[in-house]
């Protein structure tokens, strides 16, 4: 193996610092020091990774320095970096900050690591490279903007008051809107949350919301009948319109409360805003956002379904490729490494939506390092033919596309409900993976 400094102790230390700082220290002690510490570690680590590709140490260090300077001093550079990181790791944002240039002397440490090589076995390189790539790619998560939601409605005299929450951070901004005619709304800040009223009457006119649906009913001839609704299959797409929060539970998209006056009926529908019935008997949907309640911000119907299953697709492609490769070389190390990578990827994904948040990420990253390293080592030991590698990659790609297809069909209206897309994706994964393993086995026999 040609000279590389990816296994040099200083480079490995930079990797450890980058992972711990990004996933623990930044959250526990945000500020100037932890912000610059990631820049220093990244400037030591990235040239070593780039050198594995280009094989020119001076060039790798120079390109890293120039790119870092452009990203930190220009809006265009920051935008390009954000787009690249988003493509690799999901929604991300890189900010231009000239003070980060204080970390540029760390490139001198990268050069020192290159000029002071330490003899390491190639297995160490295989163990270091995967987590190094993950550490560089998994930084700069975008801040979460909590969706606005209309969570309650009540009548106060001849007025209707709609209570909302949402906004940047924890979504704790409580704002209320008051109206007499359903057209003009006055706004004020609410200091306490209001309990939603699920049934309300004005004289003989009584209305109630139906939990779990975007639907309100009214009394007619002594029976509850539907007065307004959005079909459940359309609601299924609206439910997934907003990304899940990094912790806690997603905001509801269902009818939560109703308020009735002599002129108006208003229904609080969570993230879908409100539905208002005026004196003519017509219903209108008003969206909710930082500018208040307005028809212009209501989501048009029908709307494409939003699906963020790219982690699932990547995991399916990885499993299919590993199983196809293993069927051709029959090396158990590949199975073990790929299994660890998959399971830990799932664990990290699930941790992001639990109350643990970032605290669950560091142990997950550790196990992913072991799994990725074992997978790389297994491939190097198995020595599969290029034909088998190609078949495995194609099998992984086709399996990923097969898993993605049902979700795309659901988004376009080809499937009514998201659960149907999930079931179809499981079947597609099983069929595509089995076909890939058969192809891998046949390819391996011809070796």
Image: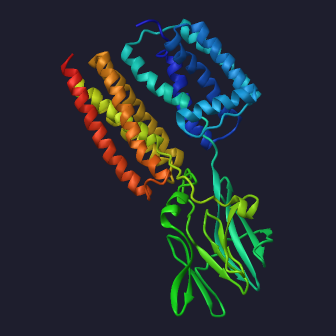
Residue pictured at 58% horizontal, 73% vertical: 256
Horizontal side, residue 270 vs residue 101: left or right:
left
Name the foreground residue: 16 vs 340.
340
- From the top left corner, tell me how far across and down residue 337 is, in percent: 33, 31
Residue pictured at 71% horizontal, 85% vertical: 261
Name the foreground residue: 64 vs 429.
429
Examine the rendered structure and indicate whether residue 74 appears above or below residue 174.
Answer: above
User: Which quadrant, please, contains the C terminus?
Assistant: top left
Name the foreground residue: 217 vs 15.
217
- From the top left corner, tell me how far across and down residue 364 is, in percent: 44, 39
Judge whether residue 132 can be spotted in this image. yes
Residue 85's image quarter?
Answer: top right
User: Which quadrant, please, contains the N terminus?
Assistant: top left
- From the top left corner, tell me how far across and down residue 154 is, in percent: 68, 79
Residue pictured at 66% horizontal, 29% vertical: 80
Horizontal side, residue 364 vs residue 215: left or right:
left
Horizontal side, residue 201 vs residue 131: left or right:
right
Examine the rendered structure and indicate whether residue 261 appears above or below residue 67.
Answer: below
Residue 273's image quarter?
Answer: bottom right
- From the top left corner, tell me how far across and down residue 68 is, in percent: 67, 22
Residue pictured at 50% horizontal, 14% vertical: 53
Judge whether residue 196 can be spotted in this image. no
| Count of numbered marks | 0
């Amino acid at each position: 193996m040609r000279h590389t400094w990816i296994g040099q102790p200083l480079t490995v230390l930079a990797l450890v610092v980058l992972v711990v700082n990004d996933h623990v220290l930044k959250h526990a002690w945000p500020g100037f020091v932890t912000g610059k510490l990631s820049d220093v570690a990244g400037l030591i680590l990235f040239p070593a990774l780039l050198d594995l590709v280009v094989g020119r140490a001076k060039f790798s260090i120079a390109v890293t320095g120039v790119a870092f300077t452009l990203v930190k001093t220009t809006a265009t550079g920051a935008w390009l970096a954000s787009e690249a990181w988003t493509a690799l790791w999901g929604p991300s944002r890189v900010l231009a900050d000239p003070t980060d240039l204080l970390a540029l002397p760390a490139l001198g440490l990268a050069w020192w690591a290159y000029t002071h090589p330490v003899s390491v076995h190639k297995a160490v390189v295989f163990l270091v490279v995967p987590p190094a790539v993950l550490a560089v790619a998994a930084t700069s998560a975008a801040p979460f903007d909590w969706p606005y939601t209309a969570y309650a409605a009540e009548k106060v005299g001849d007025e209707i008051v709609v209570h909302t929450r949402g906004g940047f951070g924890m979504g704790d901004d409580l704002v209320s809107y008051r109206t007499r005619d359903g057209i003009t709304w006055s706004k004020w800040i609410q200091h306490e949350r209001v309990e939603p009223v699920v049934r309300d009457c004005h004289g003989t006119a009584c209305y109630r919301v139906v939990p779990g649906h975007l639907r309100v009913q009214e009394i007619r001839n002594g029976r509850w009948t539907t007065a307004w609704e959005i079909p459940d299959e359309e609601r299924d797409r609206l439910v997934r319109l907003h990304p899940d929060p990094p912790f806690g539970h997603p905001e509801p998209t269902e009818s939560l409360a109703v308020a009735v006056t002599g002129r108006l009926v208003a229904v609080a529908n969570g993230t879908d805003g409100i539905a208002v019935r005026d004196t003519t008997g017509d219903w209108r949907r008003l969206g909710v956002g930082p500018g208040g309640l307005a028809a212009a911000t209501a989501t048009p119907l029908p709307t494409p379904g939003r699906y963020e299953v790219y982690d699932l697709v990547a995991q399916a492609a990885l499993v299919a490729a590993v199983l196809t490769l293993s069927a051709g070389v029959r090396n158990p190390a590949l199975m073990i490494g790929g299994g660890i990578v998959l399971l830990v990827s799932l664990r990290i994904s699930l941790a992001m939506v639990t109350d643990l948040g970032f605290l669950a990420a560091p142990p997950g990253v550790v196990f992913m390092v072991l799994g990725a390293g074992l997978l790389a080592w297994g491939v190097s030991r198995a020595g599969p033919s290029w034909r088998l590698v190609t078949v495995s990659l194609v099998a992984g790609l086709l399996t990923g596309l097969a898993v993605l297809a049902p979700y795309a069909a659901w988004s376009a209206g080809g499937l009514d409900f998201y659960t149907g897309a999930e079931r179809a994706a499981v079947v597609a994964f099983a069929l595509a993976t089995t076909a890939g393993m058969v192809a891998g086995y046949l390819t391996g026999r011809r070796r």
